[in-house]
Structures are given as structure tokens and as C-alpha cells.
């Protein structure tokens, strides 16, 4: 039996949302298992670094999970991040690679500024 993967251009917003939910679930589970918090501050950045060849501790994410996260990210053309909102609407949301590049770039710059 052959399984085909749809091209990104062929999938709709519902599919992108589903892929983003899968990414968020893996990150949340890893955070919960490691530090008993469903979404530790900045965990999405640490895990992003790990799945793209970074070294060091990243919530005990396995190589297999890294491969799955890279695949999901590629297919939904982005990543997920925590957004602090007003009136209790904080939460995880999907961002495009362009948005993520800006968000993650600011995170890296702040870490460098503080010597991390």
C-alpha cells in the first residue's frame, strides 16, 4: 500500500491547523514530561533549535520526534508559538515560516544579549 503526502499547496487551512495542532501536542507533551508544565516558557524555541541540529538538552526529544516535527513543520509551512493575549485569549497558534523567523530571531538576539 502506497501512502502519498499532499503538496502544501493542495492542503487547506483545516489541514494546516491539524498539522499545527500535532506540533503543539508533541511540544506540550515533552514540556509536561520534563518540567510538569504544559507549555514551559520558550519551549517552542528550544525544541526548534534541537530539531534543526542544535545541541544540548531539549525536553528529551528523540531523533524520531525531531524527524516528525520537521515533517509536520514543513507540511504546514510554519511552526507554533505561544501568544499572550488580552482577556484570557492566550495560547498556542500557528505562524508562517516568515513570522517564525522574526519571532525566533528576536529570541536568539535576547539570549545572546544575556549571554546564553
Image (cartoon, rainbow, N blue to C red):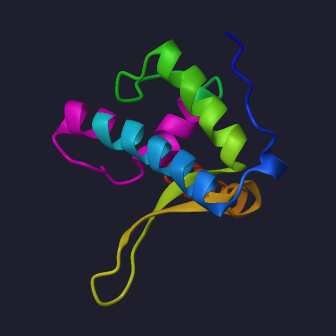
Q: Picture coordinates of residue 90 (x, y %)?
A: 35, 74
Q: Picture coordinates of residue 114 (x, y %)?
A: 49, 53
Residue at x 63% of width, y 31% of height: 70
* Vertical order, 56 against 33 (above or below): above
Residue at x 29% of width, y 37% of height: 29
Q: Residue furthest top?
A: 1
Q: Residue furthest front?
A: 1
Most common SS among magenta residues: helix
Q: Picture coordinates of residue 49 (x, y %)?
A: 58, 35
Q: Nearer the viewer, residue 114 or 20?
A: 20
Q: Picture coordinates of residue 59 (x, y %)?
A: 35, 29
Q: How many marks?
A: 0
* Vertical order, 85 against 78 (above or below): below
User: Can residue 41 be seen?
Assistant: yes
Name the image quarter holding the N terminus: top right
First to last magenta residue range? 30-50
Task: Say whether residue 91 is magenta.
Answer: no
Residue at x 39% of width, y 81% of height: 85
Task: Say whether residue 44 is magenta.
Answer: yes
* Vertical order, 32 against 96 (above or below): above
Q: Nearer the viewer, residue 103 or 15?
A: 15
26 with respect to 51 (left or right): left
Residue at x 46% of width, y 50% of height: 21
User: Can residue 116 be seen?
Assistant: no
Q: Residue furthest bottom?
A: 87
15 with respect to 31 (left or right): right
Amino acid at each position: 500500500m502506497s501512502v502519498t503526502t499532499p503538496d502544501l499547496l493542495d492542503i487547506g487551512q483545516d489541514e494546516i491547523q491539524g498539522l499545527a495542532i500535532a506540533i503543539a501536542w508533541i511540544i506540550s507533551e515533552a514540556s509536561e514530561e520534563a518540567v510538569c508544565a504544559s507549555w514551559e516558557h520558550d519551549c517552542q524555541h528550544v525544541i526548534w533549535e534541537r530539531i534543526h541540529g542544535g545541541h544540548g538538552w531539549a525536553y528529551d526529544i528523540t531523533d524520531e520526534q525531531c524527524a516528525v516535527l520537521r515533517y509536520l513543520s514543513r507540511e504546514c509551512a510554519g511552526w507554533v508559538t505561544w501568544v499572550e493575549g488580552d482577556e484570557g485569549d492566550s495560547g498556542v497558534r500557528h505562524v508562517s515560516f516568515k513570522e517564525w523567523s522574526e519571532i525566533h530571531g528576536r529570541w536568539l538576539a535576547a539570549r545572546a544579549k544575556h549571554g546564553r
